[in-house]
Image (tube, grey):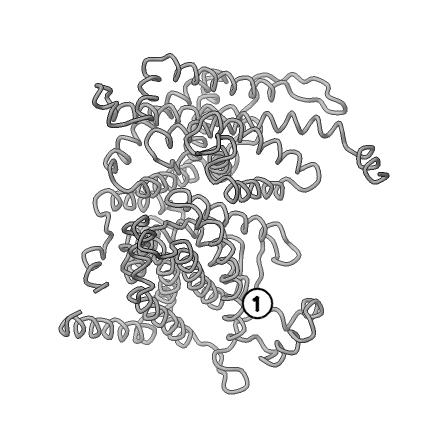
Amino acid sequence: MAAILSFFSDFPFELFVIQTLNGIVTGMILALIASGLTLIFGIMDVVNFAHGELFMLGAYVGVLVLSTTGSFWLALILATLLVATFGGAMQIITLRPLVGRDPLTTILATFGVSLILQNYALWQFGPVARKINEPYTGHFNLFYLEYPWYRLIIAALSAAIIGGFWLFLKYGRFGIWIRATMQDRVMAQAMGIPVPWVHTAAFAIGAGMAAASGVLFGPLVGVNHTMGLDWVLKAFIVVVVGGMGNLGGSIAAAIFISLLESYASIWVSPSRAVIVSFVVLILTLLFRPTGLFVPTPK
Amino acid sequence: MTRRDTIIYWSGFGVIMALLIAAPLVLPPYWARFITEILIWGLLAMSSDILIGYTGMVSFGHSAFFGLGMYGAAAALLITSQAAIMTVLPKLLQDLLLLIGERPNLLLALAFGLIAAAAIAAFVAYFSTRLRDIYFAITTLIFSQIFYVIIFTWTDVTGGENGLSFRRPALGIPGVWTTPFTPETLHWFVLAVVAGSYLILRRVMRSPFGMVLQSIRENEPRTRAIGYAVERYKIVAVMLSGLFAGLSGVLYAVQNRFAAPDFVFFIISGDAVIFNVMGGIGTLVGPIVGAATFLLLREGLGRLFGDQFPYLIPLGFIFIAIIIFLPQGLLGFMRRWLNK
């Protein structure tokens, strides 16, 4: 009893609240990346290995636009559009020829793309991290910390983008096509939906979402050519834990895992806190291989 | 295999072996070392071909087995010089280690590296074989990252970011006959291990066990329906593959006299997959050819455009082109014949 009491009296309540906030912020960013990844997987069974590199590419385009125009919001929009165009082109060049082959070949092809992009970024921008300035530098007091408003803006914006995407899937003409193609590719084709272009568009949307999260996240960590790999691994974990191709599950899993990791980093160093998400993954694979946030398959 | 095929096969094998044996005697030291390195990477690629080419499971986590082989060898080679580690071990194990030999010992390095890699492979296999296709690929990738994070952050034991460096053990059986490695004997030792592994793996892949693996690749539900315990075969395949990947890790550690976390990192797994796809999966020799092509292209591009040239950009384009236009790889045309 005394041990329990001392646990609660020593419990770092303030730190706990701060970490909850941090966890939700990174969770929203992760959800934005993972929902693009899960969209691409759900619609064409492609695991996009280059997703992290699209995230990184978006951040670098953001750096370039920001340094020439000085406007963060313009950088956000331009990076999203440019990387979305790039993603569409990448799908047409590398993935279209592979339609109908073993899905494993697509993982290899996108892996090749990720190699090219990562080394291009290293070659072009060098190994030194670039900085994106926050568009809004205000702070508010949270216990002993000055917590930046910008972090909350990121979370809100990510939620807005995901919400907009959900509305688009639900009511937009192309969104309905995307859902139809997800359900039954052959039938969709028979109904006159241009399935190859739906695939390209879905890939472009996923790429654009990754790029947007890259620009949004840039001010927190700095932009660097290896940032893609860390995030794509996390996004993979989220997508597997959330249930492959399940959008709502991915979002829930992203927030769940980010919260766990930020709570774990109260007690251990952040580089080891990553192991928590690995453990969640292993447990999920053991007991619910279809994903934590999906109904039990019958 | 007809009699004629057998003669062609073994004479081809003999010619290539003779060329590789003669290589360090005729080539300048730089290129002789280069060929040794190709053989080591080729063994790693060949081990992952068991999964990619024969069982139809793409592993993106072979760096874990390779790296654990390196760290296992490092442990064996440092254990005698660092008394602190010895005090932790039980008395029986201490005596056993001293009995095998107190000097840096090649056999001990091999044993430790293989045991480490096999243990890790058993662990990874148990979890990852529950999943198929893309899920398997992602799970192996994430497992290799787990080991990377552990090795990277456990500085007291693994040396963290700097890794461990050690003296190269002598060639031979301790107590009976030893001789220090020269570049030539190191090359021949590596060649013997790689060629031996090739012959063993070729035999295994043509055995009933290998046939079951290939039938899992072709049609898993049917293999299960016939009555084979598919999961058990997959676990053994992953362990076999991990064992040989660990062996290549030991060879690399012996050649370079260090173990570093960079070699547990995902890049190495990616390289192994690239070697396989370039050279031709399901052939065992294809991955070695793929490794040779990759390393030669890298070397050539480096010489043409300078060391700073991002060689992975053109290689990435070549890799994608091979996937789209030459899905069987460079040696794909020989695949049927090599497996007869």
Q: How many residues crowd mark 1 within 10 Å: few (<14), some (14–19), many (20+)?
A: some
* Residue B324 against residue B90 in the figure, above or below: above
In this rendering, does residue A225 appear at all? no
Q: Is residue A181 left or right of residue B99?
A: left
Q: Is residue B77 left or right of residue A3?
A: left
User: In the current view of this chain or complex, which residue is farthest to the right?
Assistant: A2
Closest to the observer, B119 or B314: B119
Q: Position of residue B253 (x, y in %)?
A: 49, 65
Closest to the observer, A194 or A74: A194
Q: Amino acid at mark 1?
A: Phe
Q: Chain of mark 1?
A: B
Q: Quadrant of residue A196?
A: top left
SS at circle 1: loop
Give the residue pinned by disc 1.
Answer: B166
User: In the current view of this chain or complex, which residue is farthest to the bottom?
Assistant: B176
Task: Count up the numbered dots.
Answer: 1
* Residue B246 against residue A141 in the figure, above or below: below
- The residue located at (43%, 18%) in the rendering is A165
Q: Position of residue B71 (x, y in %)?
A: 54, 61
- The residue located at (35%, 72%) in the rendering is B196
Quadrant containing the C terminus of chain B is: bottom left
Q: Position of residue A241 (x, y in %)?
A: 50, 36
Quadrant containing the N terminus of chain B is: bottom left
In this rendering, does residue A34 appear at all? yes
